[in-house]
Every structure is written in C-alpha cells, then in structure tokens.
Amino acid sequence: MTRVRILEKSVAERIAAGEVVERPVSIVKELVENSLDAAASRITIELQGGGSTLIRVSDDGHGMSEADLRLAVQRFATSKIRQWEDLDELLTLGFRGEALPSIAAVARVEIQTCEPDAEHGTELRIEGSETLRVAPVAGVPGTRITVRDLFFNTPARRKFLRSPAAETAQVVDLVGRLAAAWPEVHFRLSSNGKELLSFPAGLPASERLSRIWKVPAERLIPIQGQGEGLQVDGLVALPPEARSTRAAQIFLMNGRVIRSNSLSQALQEGFSPLLERGRFPVGLVRLTVDPSQVDVNVHPTKLEVRFARPRPVFSTLFRAVSSALETRGADSVRPRHLERALSPEPQAPSGVGAWSPAGRSIPPPPRVPPPPTQAVLEFLRPLQEEASPGPGDPRRSDRVGEPVRARFVPLAQLHQTFLVGLVDGELWVIDQHTAHERVNYERLGHLAPMGECSQGLLVPEVLEFPPTLAEFLAGHLEDFRGLGFEVEPFGGDAFQLRGVPAGLPARRVQEAFRALVEEAAEGAVSVRGSVPEAFRERLRAMVSCKAAVKAGDPLTHAEMTRLVHDMLEVEHSNYCPHGRPTRILLDRRALERLFHR
C-alpha cells in the first residue's frame, strides 16, 4: 500500500490549483516544506547561480518507496489528504500534490530517496515532465532532490528572473523564516559553495532571530496570549530596534509561514504609541489555530490564509504584544527631532563637513541648547525680526516656465518643517524635505563619476546586515557606489562604508544607509523583471530622500535661504522624485479666494 495517492478528480478540481513555480525561491519553499512534512531533522539547501543553475535540497526524513516516488511526480498526487474534508484537519504544510510535477515541467530534476528500513533507495530522473530513468541506488534514509537548468524549455520565463544575487537574497530570507519557525530542525544554506546560513538543531528561536535580524537576543522579549480557539506566542524586539520596513516580521500559522496585513497591523497597534511614524516593529508571531477555523486553500503559494473569525485573532495578538511591552517596561521612542532640539548638536567627525542643504560645509555656531521654553521663543523670533535679505544673484524658477530674478526672503520655519517666505513679493510655503530631495536628485543625475558626489569618511563605518540584506548588497555594490556610497565587503555579513554622498548628515550615516539597503532590497524583490537602469533610478530617488533635510530639522535663516535658492536652480523643482509638491504659492488671487473677497 503506497502512502502517495492521486486525488480523485472531484477533490482535485476544488483545490485552488495553479502554477507554483515562479522563481527559485518558490521551488526551495515547496521542497523544504516537503522535507518538514517528512519529519526531517536536518535540511541542507544548495544553490548555484541564484538557483537558476542548480537547487539541491537534502533531508533525513522518512523518504519514499519506489512506488510512492513514481506517483509523487504525477499531478494531484499527495500523501497529505485523501478527501476534501481532510482540509478541515490539515496540519501538514503541503497538500496540493502539484509541487514536484510543476517543477519537473520546467527543469531537469533528479530525485534520490530511501526509506529507513529499505535495502536500497530509488533514483528518478525527469526532464520537462518526461521520465527518463527509474532505478535502484544505494542511499541513506531521506530524500535528495536536485533541480537543474530552471526554465530550460521556456526561455521566455528566464527573462523574468532577477540577478543571481537578488534571487539568492530571496532564498536567504525564506530559509531564515523557516529556520525561526522550526528551531528543532538543523538548517544549512549555501550558495556557490559559500555557506550563508547554518542553524544547528536545538538552537533557540531567539538565537536564530538574533543572527537573522542582527538584534541582541536579550532585546527580544517573549509574547504569549490565548483567545477563542487559538494561542499566540513568539518574540518581539524592543521599540528601539524598529525598522523602516516590515521585512523583519515573521508570521506563522500552525508552523506555516504566511503573509497577513491584518496580523502586521495588530503587531503595529500593539506597539502604539512606542513607535514614531514610519517605523515598524520587529517580531516573530506564532499562531496555533484549530485547522477548521482557517482556510489555507486560498492561493497556490499557500502564503495567504483566511481566518473564519479574524477579529479574535487580531485582538489576541494585540493584547499579547502590548502586555509584554508593558510588563517589560519598554520605553517610548521619543521623536528624533525632539531629541535633537533638546540635546547638543553632534559634532561631525573630522573629514566630514557639517550638514548644509547644498552639501557644503557650514561650521555650526558654538551655542548651548536652550531649555524648551527658550526654544519656543527662538522658534517665534523669526516672525518678529526683520527678514534677512538673501543673495541677489539671478535665479531661474520653473513655477511659471520663464526665467525670473527670484530672491527668497525667509519669514519663518513652521513646525520645523515648512519654510514661509516671500519670493518676488509673493508668499510661498515650502516643504523643506521635498525641496531638498529634488535638489539632491537632480545633482546626483548630473554627477556621474563617483568621486564628484561622494565625501570620504575619516573613520570608516563597519555595518553588519542580516544575511538576506548582505546577499542583496553584495550583488549591487556598483549601483550603490555609482551614487556616492563607497562600500566594500568586510567579511561575513559585514560591510565597510568608506564614503557617502555629499550632503548626507554625518549623524545619519549608519541609519540612512541601513534604511536605504532595506528599502532597496524590498523594492528589488517586489518589482518583477525590472531592468538595471530602472533599479538605479529608484536607488537614486531613495538616496536623495535619505540625504535630504527631514521634517523636524531646525534651519537657520541662511540655511533656509540657500535651500530655496538651490531648489530654484534645478529643473522640475515643483515636485520631489516621488511626486509630492515642494511648495505652494499664495498669490493675491489665492488669498482673496481664501477670504471670500
């Protein structure tokens, strides 16, 4: 009697069937999930060429007999379910019976498998759905599946694959998530002979997450909660470890890695109000749910699930996170602009000029930061003082499409975000961040050689990244260098940053570069088939944003004047690279309309 059986047509047709092979990471996901379902305690993943040349997944699970192996490469053949109702009690990761046939349809596949008590194993070779060989072989218990030449028979689909580094980065991210979900299993991942991840069996989830996210294990706190028919547990990082994207969030449901906007929002709400806007918590959330209360048959990738009662899931996770943070006494993260306003300005290290809107060095005046009440008086003072005149040089403005002699007379900086002033007698309100972002973007476009847009660091910064980001960065070093980041590998997952784009504030070098790599990696993965030029343009826009003055940064009259005149010098200055306006013009007609005149 075989374990693997072909599903009846009535059952197969009701399963949300579909192509599961999109790129190497989808193959790795299906094969590793099969290994986990086979009770493997050790799983090894090997890649070559980002997976397009070779993917090999080996395990020490229960293996298959020759009869099971012959069935396993046929569509809708599975050992996980027998009838439709079995989905209500499903606890395995796989169930569709489509993975191996779908992989075999687009690659050259070799499977070697052996059951624990068998005298010998079995080898099967299949190419483009055509079985070439089935023969007995010597082997150890477990299964080894080798996938070569992905999309060899569909060359048009190979064009949609990204660079080997980008494809490898996706696999690193997936294996890291699975390793965190299954701490009792040994995971090892290598690429082109280089070991990228290794997690011994029994290594706690906190240590695994610490390696993946580069967060000290002691800064990961446990969460636990119980609701109606479900349990929640996991680990979340303290608020200061928050990231600029949601990439460092793992959600598991009955051992299955899933995606869920609802769970991500519940996690975010649990941290409120400890995170400032634009920052996202780091955490692993593990749900144990009655299988009958969740539908896993939503999408062929099995990443999407649908809860029968989503509200208890949301509220249980929210309470578990907020309670854990309260018990730990987690401190609120004070907004960074408030910290800067109430503490001494950091001095730029030698070799790096202090920030100026144009990237030029402006020596900061020596002063002691005033107390908050005095800071308020200083904020109001520009409204009472006579506006200082700006430079009288001719400037070009594209607000009317014709050259003009524009001079900006600053009146005030509202909320340390908006610059209010007069330009040729007209009242302008300028968003300091988007204006500076446009200035940076245009200058990066005109300064092609790296040396012209980079400033060296006297003391290089050494930054360590999670493995998935390290793999991505290693494959895109030239793109970053082309925009002024002199960065090179420094061993393992570490990189040495020797130079940054001119104008990037010294105090933000590490923060800005980390956020840039995170956002660039996330964008590179989500945009299918983008060409290198398109990626470099996105990177240029992100660098422009990271190097720009932020909302909340106090500016002097001289800095306000210089920023606005720099904005008027560049082309397309009405909008930032992301399409947000840089300023609004309140001319006489606009004011009359506001006052119903």
Image: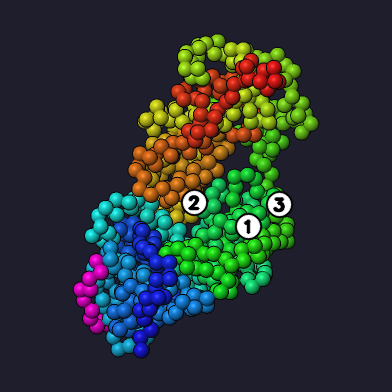
Q: Measured from the top left, where is residue 17 in percent x and y? A: 39, 66
Q: Which numbered tag is attached to residue 66?
A: none
Q: Is residue 531 one of those drawn in magenta?
A: no
Residue that sits furthest to the left in the current view: 132
Kindly identify which residue carries mark 1: 266
Compared with residue 325, is residue 245 higher up or lower down, i.e. above or below?
above
Q: Quadrant of the C terminus?
A: top right
Q: Residue at x 54, y 13 (%)?
A: 406
Q: Is residue 528 above or below residue 459?
A: below
Q: Are marks 3 and 2 in contact (CB under 8 Å)?
A: no
Instruction: Tell me whether circle 1 and circle 2 mark residues in contact (CB < 8 Å).
Output: no
Q: Earlier in the sequence, mark 3 or mark 2?
A: 3
Q: Is residue 135 magenta?
A: yes
Question: Which element carries disc 2, helix, strand or loop?
Answer: strand
Highlighted range, magenta? 128-139
Q: Nearer the viewer, mark 3 or mark 1?
A: 1
Mark 3 Cα-neighbour bin, 10 Å: few <14, some 14–19, many ≥20: few
- Horizontal arrangement in the rendering, residue 414 relative to residue 36 (left or right): right
Q: Which residue is mark 2?
A: 464
